[in-house]
Image (spheres, rainbow, N blue to C red):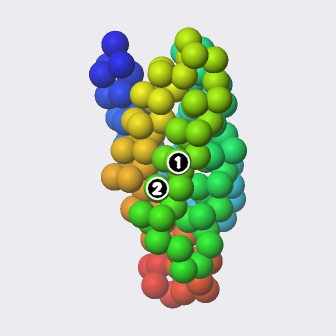
Amino acid sequence: MLTMKYLILSSMIFINTVLSNPITNYTQSHRGCGPFGIDIDTLLAKEGVGSITPCCVQHDQCYSTCGTTRDMCNNDFKNCTTTACKTQQTSSSSKCLNYANILYRITSVLGIPSFDISQAVACNQTSQLG
């Protein structure tokens, strides 16, 4: 069941990333979990997993801070979600950790364009975006 949810979630994120034009749709914001309309917190809540939105906001802020590295931001995201999951009730903690690991992997693979654009904007290098 977790594999199917992983496949669906990763497919949704991939399709959404491919269909969006990152230059014209980009706004430097910290909107939380999920790219462009995918509400990860709602999906997690349906699974009985608590919110990890503060970790997602922190991740967005890290991507949008000039000079950070993608690995640093992604590793901080993984540490934050792991800590958030461990503070949840025992019954949902392991499920949360599974989802946190999935989100980390998806972000590590599919977050490259978002990171590059965020860095270019944050470092005032918008001429490199087009």
Q: Is residue 50 left or right of residue 101?
A: right
Disc 2 versus disc 1: distance between alpha carbons? 6 Å
Residue beneath label 2, please? 75
Frontmost residue, 31 versus 98? 98
Dots 2, 1 in contact, CB < 8 A: yes
Frontmost residue, 76 versus 67? 76
Q: Give me the residue at 46% from left, 84% from top.
A: 128
Tell me the quarter of the picture where residue 12 sits: top left
Above or below, 66 relative to 77? below
x, y percent for residue 123: 59, 83
Amino acid type, residue under disc 2 in the picture: Asn
Q: Is residue 25 left or right of residue 18?
A: right
Q: Could you say whether the residue bearing mark 1 is in a helix, strand or loop?
A: helix
- Which of the image's four quarters has the N terminus? top left
Frontmost residue, 104 versus 129? 104
How many badges with numbers are in the image?
2
x, y percent for residue 10: 37, 36
Q: Is residue 116 left or right of residue 40?
A: left
Q: Could you say whether the residue bearing mark 2 is in a helix, strand or loop?
A: helix
Tell me the quarter of the picture where residue 86 sits: top right
Amino acid type, residue under disc 1 in the picture: Asn
x, y percent for residue 104: 43, 44
x, y percent for residue 114: 48, 61
Above or below, 106 relative to 67? above
**Mark 2 crowd level (few <14, some 14–19, many ≥20, 10 Å Cα):** some
Q: Give me the residue at 42% from left, 63% from top.
A: 71
Q: Does any portion of residue 122 appear in the rendered image?
A: yes
Looking at the rendered structure, which numbered label has been put on residue 79? 1
Q: Does any portion of residue 22 appear in the rendered image?
A: no
